[in-house]
Amino acid sequence: QYCDARRGALSEMQEEAARFASAVRVFREEQRALRAKMQASVIALQEELRSPEFLRQMDLAVDKMSLLRQKFQAFREQTTGPNQEYFSAAMAEVRASGATLETAMRESLARFSEFVDNCNEMVLGVGAQEEFLLDICSQANGACIDDPGAAHVGCCCAVNPVTAGG
Protein backbone atom coordinates (compact mmCIF):
# COMPACT_ATOMS: atom_id res chain seq x y z
CA GLN A 1 0.00 0.00 0.00
CA TYR A 2 2.91 2.32 0.75
CA CYS A 3 4.29 1.65 -2.73
CA ASP A 4 0.86 1.88 -4.37
CA ALA A 5 0.40 5.37 -2.92
CA ARG A 6 3.67 6.50 -4.51
CA ARG A 7 3.61 4.50 -7.76
CA GLY A 8 1.78 7.17 -9.81
CA ALA A 9 4.21 9.99 -9.02
CA LEU A 10 6.28 9.53 -12.17
CA SER A 11 3.25 9.33 -14.46
CA GLU A 12 1.82 12.48 -12.84
CA MET A 13 5.03 14.34 -13.65
CA GLN A 14 5.06 12.89 -17.17
CA GLU A 15 1.45 13.95 -17.81
CA GLU A 16 2.10 17.51 -16.70
CA ALA A 17 5.31 17.64 -18.73
CA ALA A 18 3.35 16.47 -21.79
CA ARG A 19 0.69 19.16 -21.20
CA PHE A 20 3.41 21.78 -20.92
CA ALA A 21 5.15 20.55 -24.08
CA SER A 22 1.83 20.65 -25.91
CA ALA A 23 1.17 24.21 -24.74
CA VAL A 24 4.64 25.23 -25.92
CA ARG A 25 3.96 23.69 -29.37
CA VAL A 26 0.67 25.59 -29.64
CA PHE A 27 2.41 28.79 -28.54
CA ARG A 28 5.10 28.35 -31.21
CA GLU A 29 2.46 27.87 -33.89
CA GLU A 30 0.57 30.96 -32.72
CA GLN A 31 3.86 32.85 -32.69
CA ARG A 32 4.54 31.76 -36.28
CA ALA A 33 1.02 32.72 -37.33
CA LEU A 34 1.32 36.15 -35.70
CA ARG A 35 4.74 36.70 -37.26
CA ALA A 36 3.40 35.76 -40.72
CA LYS A 37 0.38 38.03 -40.27
CA MET A 38 2.59 40.91 -39.16
CA GLN A 39 4.97 40.41 -42.08
CA ALA A 40 2.04 40.44 -44.50
CA SER A 41 0.68 43.57 -42.82
CA VAL A 42 4.07 45.30 -43.04
CA ILE A 43 4.25 44.53 -46.76
CA ALA A 44 0.69 45.80 -47.23
CA LEU A 45 1.53 48.99 -45.29
CA GLN A 46 4.65 49.57 -47.36
CA GLU A 47 2.67 49.11 -50.55
CA GLU A 48 -0.02 51.48 -49.32
CA LEU A 49 2.53 54.13 -48.31
CA ARG A 50 4.06 53.90 -51.80
CA SER A 51 0.74 53.90 -53.62
CA PRO A 52 -0.11 56.81 -55.91
CA GLU A 53 -3.32 57.41 -53.92
CA PHE A 54 -1.51 57.82 -50.60
CA LEU A 55 1.24 59.93 -52.17
CA ARG A 56 -1.47 62.19 -53.62
CA GLN A 57 -3.14 62.42 -50.17
CA MET A 58 0.21 63.36 -48.63
CA ASP A 59 0.77 66.03 -51.28
CA LEU A 60 -2.63 67.57 -50.53
CA ALA A 61 -2.56 67.17 -46.73
CA VAL A 62 -1.87 70.21 -44.60
CA ASP A 63 -0.97 68.07 -41.54
CA LYS A 64 1.11 65.33 -43.13
CA MET A 65 2.18 63.85 -39.76
CA SER A 66 -1.45 63.41 -38.74
CA LEU A 67 -2.22 61.49 -41.93
CA LEU A 68 0.85 59.31 -41.43
CA ARG A 69 -0.12 58.68 -37.78
CA GLN A 70 -3.59 57.58 -38.90
CA LYS A 71 -2.06 55.02 -41.29
CA PHE A 72 0.23 53.68 -38.59
CA GLN A 73 -2.64 53.55 -36.07
CA ALA A 74 -4.76 51.57 -38.54
CA PHE A 75 -1.78 49.26 -39.15
CA ARG A 76 -1.35 48.68 -35.42
CA GLU A 77 -5.04 47.94 -34.90
CA GLN A 78 -5.02 45.52 -37.82
CA THR A 79 -1.98 43.60 -36.63
CA THR A 80 -2.99 43.40 -32.95
CA GLY A 81 -6.49 42.04 -33.56
CA PRO A 82 -7.59 38.41 -33.17
CA ASN A 83 -4.15 37.00 -34.01
CA GLN A 84 -2.68 38.84 -31.05
CA GLU A 85 -5.47 37.48 -28.86
CA TYR A 86 -4.72 33.88 -29.92
CA PHE A 87 -1.02 34.48 -29.28
CA SER A 88 -1.74 35.98 -25.86
CA ALA A 89 -4.04 33.06 -24.96
CA ALA A 90 -1.36 30.57 -26.01
CA MET A 91 1.22 32.44 -23.94
CA ALA A 92 -1.09 32.39 -20.92
CA GLU A 93 -1.56 28.63 -21.37
CA VAL A 94 2.22 28.12 -21.41
CA ARG A 95 2.50 30.10 -18.17
CA ALA A 96 -0.36 28.19 -16.54
CA SER A 97 0.81 24.75 -17.61
CA GLY A 98 4.37 25.66 -16.58
CA ALA A 99 3.14 26.59 -13.12
CA THR A 100 1.14 23.35 -12.92
CA LEU A 101 4.20 21.37 -14.01
CA GLU A 102 6.32 23.11 -11.37
CA THR A 103 3.75 22.24 -8.69
CA ALA A 104 3.50 18.63 -9.89
CA MET A 105 7.28 18.30 -9.89
CA ARG A 106 7.55 19.74 -6.40
CA GLU A 107 4.78 17.50 -5.03
CA SER A 108 5.52 14.32 -6.97
CA LEU A 109 9.31 14.25 -6.96
CA ALA A 110 9.52 13.44 -3.26
CA ARG A 111 6.92 10.67 -3.65
CA PHE A 112 8.77 9.29 -6.66
CA SER A 113 12.08 9.30 -4.76
CA GLU A 114 10.41 7.48 -1.86
CA PHE A 115 8.98 4.96 -4.31
CA VAL A 116 12.37 4.23 -5.88
CA ASP A 117 14.19 4.19 -2.54
CA ASN A 118 11.69 2.07 -0.60
CA CYS A 119 9.89 -0.06 -3.16
CA ASN A 120 12.83 -1.42 -5.15
CA GLU A 121 12.55 -4.96 -3.79
CA MET A 122 10.96 -8.25 -4.78
CA VAL A 123 7.46 -8.86 -3.39
CA LEU A 124 4.87 -11.58 -3.88
CA GLY A 125 2.87 -11.02 -7.05
CA VAL A 126 -0.88 -10.99 -6.45
CA GLY A 127 -3.50 -11.28 -9.21
CA ALA A 128 -6.66 -9.27 -9.79
CA GLN A 129 -8.66 -11.66 -7.57
CA GLU A 130 -6.01 -11.66 -4.83
CA GLU A 131 -4.64 -15.03 -5.99
CA PHE A 132 -0.95 -15.67 -5.43
CA LEU A 133 -0.48 -19.43 -6.05
CA LEU A 134 -1.16 -21.14 -9.36
CA ASP A 135 -1.93 -24.86 -9.24
CA ILE A 136 -0.21 -26.12 -12.37
CA CYS A 137 -1.03 -29.84 -12.24
CA SER A 138 -1.29 -33.03 -10.24
CA GLN A 139 1.95 -35.07 -10.17
CA ALA A 140 1.30 -38.36 -8.41
CA ASN A 141 -2.46 -38.82 -8.17
CA GLY A 142 -5.82 -37.18 -8.81
CA ALA A 143 -6.21 -35.66 -5.35
CA CYS A 144 -7.04 -31.96 -5.12
CA ILE A 145 -4.31 -29.60 -3.99
CA ASP A 146 -5.80 -29.13 -0.51
CA ASP A 147 -5.91 -32.94 0.13
CA PRO A 148 -3.13 -34.11 2.51
CA GLY A 149 -2.08 -36.86 0.06
CA ALA A 150 -1.97 -34.59 -2.97
CA ALA A 151 1.20 -34.16 -4.97
CA HIS A 152 0.77 -31.03 -7.07
CA VAL A 153 3.14 -28.56 -8.67
CA GLY A 154 2.35 -24.91 -8.06
CA CYS A 155 4.04 -21.63 -8.72
CA CYS A 156 3.96 -18.04 -7.61
CA CYS A 157 5.62 -14.92 -8.92
CA ALA A 158 7.78 -12.25 -7.42
CA VAL A 159 7.60 -8.73 -8.82
CA ASN A 160 9.57 -5.58 -8.30
CA PRO A 161 7.13 -2.62 -7.94
CA VAL A 162 9.66 -0.25 -9.50
CA THR A 163 9.82 -2.27 -12.73
CA ALA A 164 6.26 -3.65 -12.71
CA GLY A 165 4.61 -0.50 -14.03
CA GLY A 166 1.02 0.49 -13.30
Image: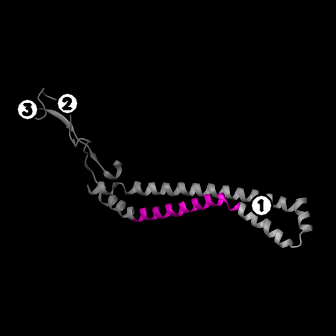
Q: Residues within 10 Å of mark 2 (few under 14, many from 20)?
A: some
Residue 149 shows which numbered tag?
Answer: 3
User: How many residues crowd mark 3 within 10 Å: few (<14), some (14–19), many (20+)?
Assistant: few
Mark 1 sits on what residue?
Answer: 42
Disc on the earlier residue, 1 or 2: 1
Estimate the spatial distance between the alpha carbons at disc 3 and disc 2, rounded to whole Å. Answer: 14 Å
Q: Position of residue 69 (x, y in %)?
A: 79, 70
* Location of residue 104 by image quarter: bottom left
Observer-nearest residue: 41 or 138?
41
Disc 3 residue type?
Gly
- Which residue was labeled with disc 2? 137
Q: What span is in magenta?
A: 79-106
Label for residue 29? none
Mark 2 falls on what kind of element? strand
Of discs 3 and 1, which sits in the foreground? Answer: 1
The amino acid on which the numbered mark 1 sits, given as a three-letter code, is: Val
From the viewer's perspective, tell me whether residue 58 is left or right of residue 148. right
